[in-house]
Image (tube, grey):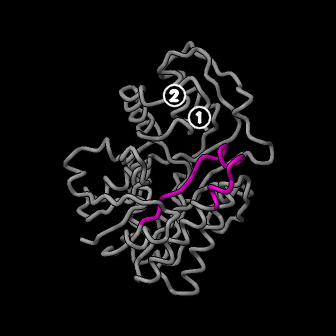
Amino acid sequence: MKKILVTGADGFIGSHLTEELVKKGYDVKAFVYYNSFNTWGWLDSLPKDIMDHVDIFQGDIRDPNGVSEALEGCDAVFHLAALIAIPFSYHSPDTYVDTNIKGTLNVLQAAKKKGIRTLVTSTSEVYGTAQYVPIDELHPYQGQSPYSATKIGADRLAESFYRSFELPVTIVRPFNTYGPRQSARAVIPTIITQLLAGKREIKLGSLTPTRDFNYVKDTANGFISIYESDKTVGEEINIATQREISIGQLAEELIRQINPDAKIICDEQRLRPEKSEVNRLLGCNKKILELTSWHPQYTFEEGLAETIEFLKHNLDKYKIDIYNL
């Protein structure tokens, strides 16, 4: 089987993608962020029978030399390494430029030298608040946060390497992914962890925005299906369920399932600037269904149940009493 480098393999989606690739028989090299604790992020939690088939490369996506070395001997790269938290991008935008734009450039440059098939991870945040729904891949881009602006820049760099150098690139654009191992900065684990900790007042920001939620295993298999299709080179492809739910409705459903006595309160520090809040995301999945064999395997209800079960057994890993940027 092909050898695939996964950057950001230590993160939420990256760890699930690494696991799914191994299960499908791929030879996987995991690019993890070098740190003095020698931790490999969520890969440290994977079973030994998975990790025995993973080659670890510790580096920094901002370093072109390490990125180039990591790509040696690989047939493809799935580039997921990124800074993702929107609130943190408000006061530290330089780090997002260095990681999301320059890091992506490092991957593209190294892949170009070696002629390697490249999947670059985008985000539904590049679309901003929907100007029409469902949002297809032709929808205009709108940088409503420094984070989304850097992801727009990274996407356009990837497009330029396809058009200028014929690098076999695909831009993969998941809508909001959730599931086991997601950080507490995301809304679903934020709600669930507060409820599981017995909180009677669930602190949230705006309740009216809507999101199109993908269960993480469906997202991971979306990447693999896009890679395995011979029709996806040079394309930008959404991974979406084409179903939306408001944050308020989501919170009420989780309260009903976990602790019906809880109530929602607005935490001012969690509110985003008015023009920065993305008010509606509902993705179109027509293109991925046409070009690949992918179909979602999990209902929203099934995904939530698995997420709740995971968090029940890992609550100690989450800082529940603070606002996680």
Give the magenta part as a residue range: 78-97
Which badge, 1 or 2, comes first in the chain's sequence?
A: 2
- Report the amino acid beneath label 2: Lys
Q: Secondary structure at mark 1?
A: loop
> Dot 1 corresponds to which residue?
324
Residue most toward the front? Answer: 36
Could you tell me which residue is drawn at 52 percent across and 35 percent down? 184
Q: Is residue 240 above or below residue 313?
A: below
Q: Is residue 67 left or right of residue 271?
A: left
- Report the amino acid beneath label 1: Asn
Q: Is residue 65 left or right of residue 91?
A: left
Could you tell me which residue is drawn at 80 percent across and 43 percent down? 274
Could you tell me which residue is drawn at 41 percent across and 39 percent down? 180
Depth order, front residue of 128/52: 52
Q: Secondary structure at mark 2?
A: loop
Q: Is residue 177 on the magenta stretch?
A: no
> Dot 2 corresponds to which residue?
319
Residue 189 place in picture, x, y as percent: 51, 33
Q: Is residue 199 above or below residue 186?
A: above
In the figure, residue 67 lies in which quadrant?
A: bottom left
Could you tell me which residue is drawn at 26 percent across and 64 percent down? 26
Residue 301 place in picture, x, y as percent: 45, 36
Cα separation, mark 1 vs mark 2, equals 8 Å
Callout 1: 10 Å neighbours few (<14), some, many (20+)?
some
Depth order, front residue of 314/240: 314
Q: Is residue 92 left or right of residue 234?
A: right
Look at the numbered discs 1 and 2 and tell me whether their residues touch, using CB distance below 8 Å.
yes
Q: Is residue 79 on the magenta stretch?
A: yes
